Image: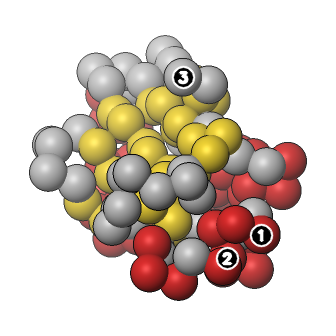
Amino acid sequence: MRAYLIDEIHHSDMEKITGFLKESAMKSGMDNLFWVRIPDDILSETQFEHNNCRPHVFAVELGKDWLKLELFVRSLKNIQCTCPAYATLQQKDFIINFAHHMIDRLDIRT
């Protein structure tokens, strides 16, 4: 899986990140996994056409001292569809900017 990894994060900063994600992302069925919605205006053509598959999201996984953002856009409603795919360039920019915005907003040192 292609992903964007940020590691060597202090424990107190991981708590800030967890709190931020609890407020701004969707909780998955796993404790350390969150879903972040991809805005409709940057969906691929196929994803945009698949209204029944929305929302399209990327995963954020938290470890002991790391944060991993998957560069894969998936549907939470239909995993068998053709619309899940690796992130487009615009979607990759959104995912990486999401991480950087969160780090800046929470004043986390990396």
Quarter of the picture containing the C terminus is top right
Q: Residue at x 54, y 36 (%)?
A: 70
- Name the one closer to the observer, 61 or 23: 61
Q: Position of residue 74 (x, y in %)?
A: 49, 53
Q: Quadrant of residue 23?
A: bottom left
Q: Which residue is mark 2?
A: 48
Q: Position of residue 47 (x, y in %)?
A: 64, 68
Q: Is residue 65 above or below residue 77?
A: above
Residue type at tag 3 = Met
Query: Upstream in the sequence, badge 3 or badge 2?
Result: 3
Residue density around tag 2, few if under 14, some if 14–19, many if 20 or more, within 10 Å: some
Extreme residue in the top direction: 8
Q: Position of residue 80 (x, y in %)?
A: 39, 51
Disc ID at residue 93: none
- Name the one closer to the observer, 15 or 82: 82
Q: Which residue is mark 1?
A: 45
> Whole-Å distance between the Cαs marked 2 and 1?
5 Å
Q: Is residue 6 above or below residue 36?
A: above
> In front of the other: label 3 or label 2?
2
> Whole-Å distance between the Cαs marked 3 and 2?
23 Å
| Numbered-mark total | 3
Secondary structure type for disc 1: helix
- Name the one closer to the observer, 61 or 104: 61
- Residue 20 appears in the picture as rendered: no
Q: Quadrant of residue 6?
A: top right
Q: Residue at x 66, y 40 (%)?
A: 86
Residue type at tag 2 = Phe
Q: Residue at x 47, y 57 (%)?
A: 81
Contact between labelled residues 1 and 2, with CB atoms less than 8 Å apart: yes
Q: Position of residue 29 (x, y in %)?
A: 14, 51
Q: Which residue is mark 3?
A: 1
Residue type at tag 1 = Glu
